[in-house]
Amino acid sequence: MFYDEVRVSLKAGKGGDGCMSFRREKYIPFGGPDGGNGGKGGDVLIRGDENVGDLRTFHFKPGWKAQTGEGGKGKKMVGRSGKDCLLKLPLGSLVINEITGEVLAEITVHGQEQILLQGGGGGRGNSTFKSSINQAPRQTTEGKAGEEHDFKFILKTIADIGLVGFPNAGKSSLTRLITTATPKIGSYPFTTLNPSVGIVDYPDLFDQLKLADIPGIIDGASENRGLGIRFLKHIERCSVLLLILDMAGIDGRSPVDDYDQLIHELGNYKKDLLSKKIFVAANKMDEPEATENLKTFKRLKPEVRIQPISCLTEEGLEELKNLFYKECKA
């Protein structure tokens, strides 16, 4: 399972209580107050980590709490601060206030860190209440409670290229052929039930790109039908969108209609997506009907940039990889 949306309850640590103590040493019967302050409660922090793939940790453990500060001690010793609660999030995560819906943080860089909740301050020991008119105070204060809140974590995959297409267009096959990812492949709808990110290597250039295989879109996906907007959000951060079409028209599909429907769903979900670099991979060119369909597509859609490929014969895959690099590095 791929976990890209979770709800969590977080609580910062309570501050330690102040101490009431009096100095007691030989020959000093009235040494005065020496109770120390309590330690500060731990904060709740988030940190971006490129080694974390999804939000499964928080799915299985939705409640997290920072450590309480240590109470003050005699001899004016201040209590130790509570340990912070550090939450590691995958790159592309949004932190949203569960009540207001406000986006509080957006994690896009490895090592990016932000405090979500502040720990409570430590209480005052009785030594801090000493004054000229109160030489032996017996007053202390308790540590303050730490902040607590419910949040929603949402992961929007960060990748250079977003691979979009209808079920059985060949997305998973293409991903398996040109990247390190190994998605499940089958000739039935919704083989891909979870987004997968693979690495496209360019050893001669000592470089690589990330490609996200987004689960198959259906008509009405932007209105949350089928797998819907749950997975459309994963292409928002991609700089290039590749629409993969079944150019052979298997199952009675029309490549031109498929293209129009994909563009409609993307624009209906978010208009900004259509301002990205978009080009088409014409898959299944090994089929006899594909050649004629490709000619028709080019005639009706002359403005569309298209690369013919075949995941069966691996025709055009190297050219497609070069196109990826050129578009992403431009």
Image: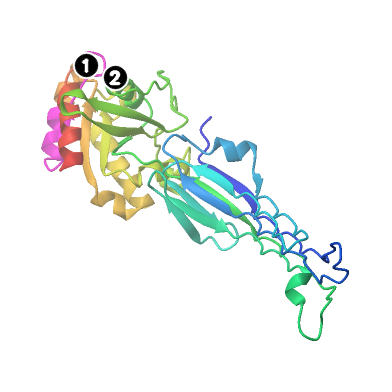
Name the quadrant containing residue 41: bottom right
**In this view, 189 is above or below 117:** above
| Region in magenta | 294-313
The residue at which mark 2 appears reads as: 177
Across and down, in percent, residue 89 comes to 49, 43
Residue at 27% x, 42% y is: 260
Residue at 82% x, 70% y is: 31
SS of the residue under disc 1: loop
Across and down, in percent, residue 21 comes to 83, 64
Q: Nearer the viewer, residue 273 or 187?
A: 273
Q: Dot 2, how many residues are within 10 Å of its Cα: few (below 14), some (14-19), or many (20+)?
A: some
The residue at which mark 1 appears reads as: 314
Q: Amino acid at mark 1?
A: Glu
Across and down, in percent, residue 6 comes to 57, 44
Q: Are marks 1 and 2 in contact (CB under 8 Å)?
A: yes
Residue at 38% x, 50% y is: 269
